[in-house]
Amino acid sequence: MKLPDRKSVLISNLVLLLLSAAACLMIVVRAVVTGELSYFYLIWNLFLAWIPLVFALIMFYRLKTAFKKKWKSILLSLLWLVFYPNAPYMITDFIHIRRGETLLVWYDFIIFSLFIITAFIIGFLSLYLVHRIVAWFTENNFAGWIFAVIVQFCSGFGIYLGRVRRWNSWDALFNPIVLLNEVLDSLQYKPLIFSFLFGLFLLLTYSAVYSLTILGSSQTYKKSPAFSARDN
């Protein structure tokens, strides 16, 4: 399985940076106009969404050297897995949107949508890169998809821990024992159903967006003589 083109990855990241800047600018404009500092936490959440993509990019651009030293590849992979749920987690921020018909409410809706869509694309690109790396490293496309499926359902559980239990990825580094006890305590019916539903949602949307990459990488076909004749 071929790895993504480096130029395409670079362009995708530049687009995501522009989207992130636009979203943050909308927050600043809202603060200036209303005098409120509401929703500034979205900027922090978006920052957290960027962290797994940074780890994925390090693995991607230093692929050959990283995998020569197994401890580096293992460390990067674990860090990526711990922080990855921060990207799809942002979809749950929709619950903070205020209700009403005022112009400010619709402005807020656009803010939330821009942040969440940007984080979602960041998450997709992050998983896409690691998915392709796994398939390339194992020389098995099926193994890459098994990895993606497992990650998405684990992310569903991560979203549960973040939204319902209010834990975050940093706790895995600084409070691992306490977090482990919380994970074991969460292995119950309702938390698992919550995790499964979000994991299924993430997997379906990832598969749908992944299919678009096939269209983007399809070959350009030459015009047939019949069409060339029409053009003349």
Image: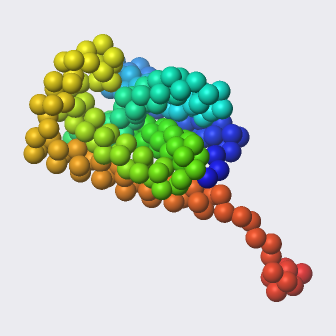
In front here: 201 or 29? Answer: 201
Residue 12 place in picture, x, y as percent: 60, 40
| Residue 114 appears left or right of 231 | left
| Residue 54 appears left or right of 180 | right
Quarter occupied by the C terminus: bottom right
Residue at image x 31%, y 40%? 154
- Number of on-image labels: 0
Residue at image x 57%, y 55%? 213
Q: Quadrant of residue 88?
A: top left
Residue 132 place in picture, x, y as percent: 55, 46
In front here: 29 or 87? Answer: 87
| Residue 17 appears left or right of 87 | right
Residue 205 place in picture, x, y as percent: 40, 54
Question: Considering only vertical position in the picture, is 20 above or below 179?
Answer: below
For the question of whether residue 24 can be seen, the reply is no
Outermost residue toward the right in this view: 232
For the question of whether residue 193 can be seen, the reply is yes
Residue 198 place in picture, x, y as percent: 27, 47
